[in-house]
Image (tube, rainbow, N blue to C red):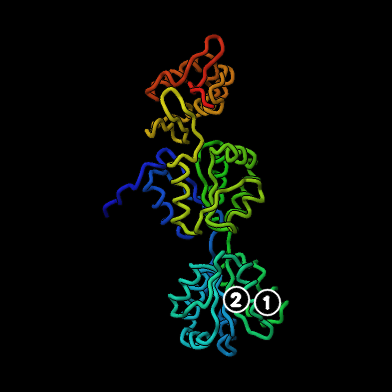
Amino acid sequence: MTARPPLSAALDGCTVVIAVDRRAGELAAALERHGAQVRQAPAVTIVSHIDDEALVDATRALIANPPDIVVATTGVGFRGWMEAAFEADLADELAAALSRAQIVARGPKARGAVQQAGFTADWVAESETSAELGEYLVTQGVEGRRIAVQHHGSGADGLDELFESHGADVVSLTVYRWGPPPDPQVVLRSVIQAGDGEVDAVLFTSAPGAAEWVAAASAAHALEDIRDRAAQGRLLLAAVGPITAGPLQDARLHPVVAERGRLGSLVRTVVAYFGAGGAPHAQTSAGRFELRSGGAVIEGRFVPLSRTGIDVLDMLFRARGAVVTRAELQHALPRSSQNSHAVEMAVARLREALGVPDVIKTVVKRGYRLNVEDQE
């Protein structure tokens, strides 16, 4: 198969972690077309309930006593429910039972799944939140009405309790649930690398996944480093929507939230950040200068660098033109090379790799600085 051509070089030198299980391949491919190196580190998995007897029993109960209202909260969940009915040879009977029900969806994905199953969504929550959906139905009046609620993976959206408190008869359907990460060591490495500056962005598409990744970072004592890098703008944390962003905000990580709650919008958010001036930069004698986990970007030209070169340049970049002493730069070198001569050699190799030697200035008897131009 012929590889698809790149769309841009906006993410050249960027390493992006996607803490995603579902549709991870699709998201990775979209990022790679803009030059990113992608590492998959799903913090949770989706565990299907298709063989769960409780789901089939609840479906039979709805066939025997059809609902007045059907609530679809997720596309994957609603499709999973329809697949479970098909596997249990109940598809036709369920379709007949739902034919007269009012169907409401928590967002466009859920609406798409409803339409794919041959039904019509009568109303869609504009904010894509359970809170708006619940408020809409309660305002309409749910007392005495039978409501089938298809839940998302964590199942803790409060809709069952809300409707029951207003007199509704609720049938709860959890079609999938969140399980542990497929490889906890991969998640552990991702949080350590994010804190150490080996990652430029981490992407999240579910609140449980975000919560588990934050918990892994805390357990690895990497959360403070991650918080520091994110505050500097050197690490982009991006969430597909406000619900997904919740656990990150609770951890004081201040993520960027995609505008439209779609994978495509999430990709555009990352591309815009690194390709349209959102990432931290300095105006130097060589022009606009940005630092990535894989190297430097000078006037839009990506220059790959060694890990040691990046660590040295990171200290100079953080100083923003102030002098960094040789003793301080020694800390960026491997322990076996921590001496003043090794610093001089590292800076010399870095200048050669950058191709613009004057961008790193020697300050006699003091150290080195990034040749940053005065800016008001």
Q: Is residue 81 above or below residue 46?
A: below
Q: Looking at the picture, which amino acid does disc 1 mark?
A: Phe
* Secondary element at image label 2: strand
Q: Give the farthest residue toward the top.
A: 365
User: Which quarter shows the N terminus?
Assistant: bottom left
Q: Which mark is residue 149?
A: 2
Residue 244 visible to the viewer:
yes
Q: Nearer the viewer, residue 136 or 159?
A: 136
Residue for point 62% across, 49% down: 214
Q: Secondary structure at mark 1?
A: helix
In front: mark 1 or mark 2?
Answer: 1
Q: Are marks 1 and 2 in contact (CB under 8 Å)?
A: yes
Q: Which residue corresponds to the image point at 48% horizontal and 17% vertical from the top-left?
A: 361
Residue at 49% over, 58% down: 260
Label 1 packing within 10 angstroms: few (<14), some (14-19), many (20+):
many
Q: Is residue 221 above or below residue 159?
A: above
How packed is label 2: few (under 14 Cα within 10 Å), some, or many (20 or more)? many
Q: Residue at x 47, y 33 (%)?
A: 291
Residue 184 is situated, as x and y percent measured from the top left of the image, at 56, 51
Is 167 left or right of 245, judged from the image as shown?
right
Residue 183 visible somewhere in the drawing: no
Sequence-first tag of 1 and 2: 2
User: Which residue is tagged 1?
Assistant: 163
Q: Position of residue 288 (x, y in %)?
A: 43, 30
| Position above or below: 104 against 368 | below
How many numbered marks have been drawn onto this rendered protein structure?
2
Comparing 129 with 76, the one in front is 129
Amino acid on which disc 2 is placed: Val
Please say if 111 is above or below 276.
below
Q: Is residue 345 left or right of residue 252?
A: left
Give the CA separation, mark 1 to mark 2: 10 Å
Q: Position of residue 78 (x, y in %)?
A: 51, 73
